[in-house]
Amino acid sequence: MTAREFFHKFNSTYVWGNILAIVILVLLLAIGVRFGLDFYTHHGESIVVPDVVHKQYDEAVDIMDKMGLTIEVTDTGYVKELPPDCILEQSPAGGKRIKSTHVIYVTVNAASAPSLVIPDIIDNNSLREAQAQLLSMGFKVGEPEYIPGEKDWIYGILVNGRHVQAGDRVPSDAVIVLQVGDGTREISDTAGLNEPQYEDVEVEEKMPKYDEVEEYVEVPVDENGNEIKDERGKPGAGRPASGPSSGLPADPSSPKPTE
């Protein structure tokens, strides 16, 4: 292809028509983006946020609808002096200028105080450790009550004058009173802790009883150990013992009878 033929095709109506169409399309896109973004983002438009703090939630929704704003609940709190469903906080705050597409986030008041679980701190923590743990969990900690015991050691927890244990649920606005040792211990606290208890039992002393009382008779024997008989061939009569016995054999040291 020669240079003359190339320039002839380049100057054709078809090529220039395509170039012109592309330029027009780009211009339209630029104009559409410019004005479309302004319309979509409400450029130059601003609304003053109404203050709905301490108003009821239903009332706050009506106020925001009239202003073209949307309200959304993100959290709940509890203030004893305010009624339930009352607006406690809002973001953005009242008086600020925003666009109509912005959402107003609010915190409403709960009907009752949320409850919290008592941690295991009795006889397990010092005063400083217990106070730090309770405060981090959202409890209100009052002045401690000192009782006899090891210094700064936790012995009990009081809520409204009542003893509570680990695992009990109490209102988050209740004041926790810790019973803490004052470093002293009375004798009555430790007396009798390790002493065994005994019962008084009467023991009946019993004397030995014997069913029978026997007498023994001494029988004379010769030097070979044979029994000595009398003239009639009967065994020789011995003499009775001087007193009753328990059936034991005669004392070998006693004198033998003489013939």
Image (cartoon, helix red, strand yellow):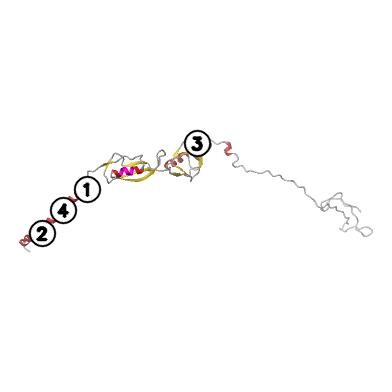
Mark 2 surroundings within 10 Å by alpha-carbon count, few (fewer than 14), some (14 through 19), many (20 or more): few
Q: Secondary structure at mark 3?
A: strand
Kind of residue sitting beneath label 1: Phe
Q: Secondary structure at mark 4?
A: helix
Residue 171: x and y, percent? 45, 42
Whether residue 155 is visible here, answered yes or no, is no
Chain-order first, disc 2 or disc 4: 2
Mark 4 surroundings within 10 Å by alpha-carbon count, few (fewer than 14), some (14 through 19), many (20 or more): few
Task: Name the residue tied to disc 2.
Answer: 15
Check residue 125 in the rendering and tell me which mark sits there, or answer none.
none
Chain-order first, disc 4 or disc 1: 4
Q: CA distance from mark 4 to mark 3?
A: 81 Å
Kind of residue sitting beneath label 3: Glu
Check residue 26 in the rendering and tell me which mark sits there, or answer none.
4
Task: Name the residue tied to disc 1.
Answer: 39
Residue occupying the point 19% across, 48% down: 35
> Relative to 241, is 130 above or below?
above
Task: Please name whichever residue, 27 or 225, is drawn nearer the observer in this view of the structure.
Answer: 27
Check residue 145 in the rendering and tell me which mark sits there, or answer none.
3
Mark 3, mark 1: which one is toward the viewer? 1
Mark 4, mark 3: which one is toward the viewer? 4
Please say if the residues under marks 4 and 1 sit with CB atoms less than 8 Å apart: no
Residue 18: x and y, percent? 12, 58
Part of the protein shown in magenta? 60-64
Chain-order first, disc 2 or disc 1: 2
Please say if the residues under marks 2 and 3 sit with CB atoms less than 8 Å apart: no
